[in-house]
Image (spheres, rainbow, N blue to C red):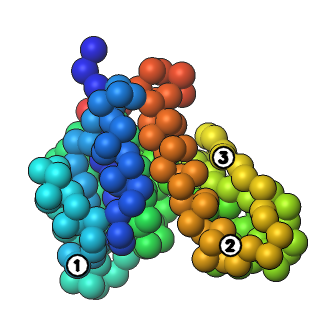
């Protein structure tokens, strides 16, 4: 059976892209392509150095979100992905894009959703005094960070920990969690919707 085809969408440093790519062969999926909205992203440089097919769709070249989303969808379609994995993608996708890829579009978020959706999750978690924090992989829906949860990884918050230290520990969890979820899709333990022609 052919490995599951995964397209990864990125904006920044690409640490989750690297983790996803490095663990692919052992988990039954392959990175069929990388798309970024940021031509200067370290993730783009990593993809090129790793000989991964990469396309840049610079959001600044589009008049509105809808036209950018259309271009993004077209770029992704070239890679024929079964799963689209957002990995540090810093744009909000429009409803039409989300609906088009429903059930195949996933994201990783640095908190134990539904707690702390949005930005500054680690600072907010510490301010709230939580004793447990972590990361969540979820399906993307029109509700920001509100889609069905697929899997979570947890850690205990340490006394006196600052947001930067906590962020680093959560990121290490992400680098194991995200590839593991893709491996579950590859093994058919998470069902995919029927593909439309």
From the image, which quarter does the C terminus lie in?
top left
Name the residue carrying label 2: 122
Label 2 neighbour load within 10 Å: few <14, some 14-19, many 20+? many
Choose between 96 and 114: the one closer to the eye. Answer: 114
Badge 1 is on which residue?
A: 40
Q: Nearer the viewer, mark 1 or mark 3?
A: 3
Q: Dots 1 and 3: beta carbons under 8 Å? A: no
133 relative to 181, above or below: below
Quadrant of residue 132 in the image?
Answer: bottom right
| Picture residue at 53% right of the left edge, 55% below the top | 172
Answer few, some or many: residues within 10 Å of disc 3's Cα (few below 14, many 20 plus, some between 14 and 19): some
Q: Position of residue 54 (x, y in %)?
A: 17, 57
In depth, the one of 32 and 110 nearer the eye is 110
Q: In this view, does 86 lie to the left or right of 125?
A: left
Residue, x 31% and y 45% (percent of image)?
21
**Quick check: can you spot residue 140?**
no
- Is the residue marked by circle 1 packed among few (<14), some (14-19), or many (20+) residues within 10 Å? some
Horizontal relation, residue 134 to residue 76: left or right: right
| Residue 180 seen in the current view | yes
User: Which callout, 1 or 3, points at the residue further toward the start of the chain?
Assistant: 1
How far, Cα to Cα, is label 1 from label 3? 30 Å
Q: Nearer the viewer, residue 60 or 116?
A: 116
Q: Are marks 3 and 2 in contact (CB under 8 Å)?
A: no
Work out whether mark 3 precedes mark 2 in sequence or the reverse, and give the earlier one.
2
In the drawing, what numbered circle is on residue 153?
3
Q: For mark 3, give the secondary structure.
A: strand
- Which quarter of the figure has residue 27? top left
Label 1, secondary structure: give it.
loop
Looking at the figure, which quarter contains the N terminus? Answer: top left
Q: As rendered, which of 169 and 2 lies closer to the eye? A: 169
Q: Position of residue 169 (x, y in %)?
A: 60, 61
Name the residue: 37% across, 45% down: 20
């Amino acid at each position: 059976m052919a490995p599951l085809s995964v397209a990864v969408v990125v904006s920044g440093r690409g640490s989750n892209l690297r983790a996803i790519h490095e663990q692919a062969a052992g988990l039954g999926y392959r990175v069929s392509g990388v798309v970024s909205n940021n031509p200067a992203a370290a993730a783009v440089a990593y993809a090129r150095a790793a000989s991964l097919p990469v396309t840049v769709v610079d959001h600044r070249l589009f008049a509105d979100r809808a036209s950018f989303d259309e271009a993004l969808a077209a770029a992704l379609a070239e890679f024929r992905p079964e799963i689209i994995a957002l990995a540090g993608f810093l744009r909000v996708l429009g409803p039409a894009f989300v609906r088009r890829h429903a059930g195949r579009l996933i994201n990783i978020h640095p908190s134990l959703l539904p707690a702390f959706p949005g930005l500054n999750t680690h600072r907010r978690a510490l301010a709230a005094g939580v004793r447990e924090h972590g990361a969540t992989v979820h399906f993307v829906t029109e509700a920001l960070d509100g889609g069905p949860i697929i899997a979570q990884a947890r850690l205990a918050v340490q006394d006196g920990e600052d947001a930067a230290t906590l962020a680093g520990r959560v990121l290490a969890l992400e680098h194991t969690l995200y590839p593991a979820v893709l491996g579950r899709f590859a093994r058919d333990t998470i069902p995919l919707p029927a593909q439309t022609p």
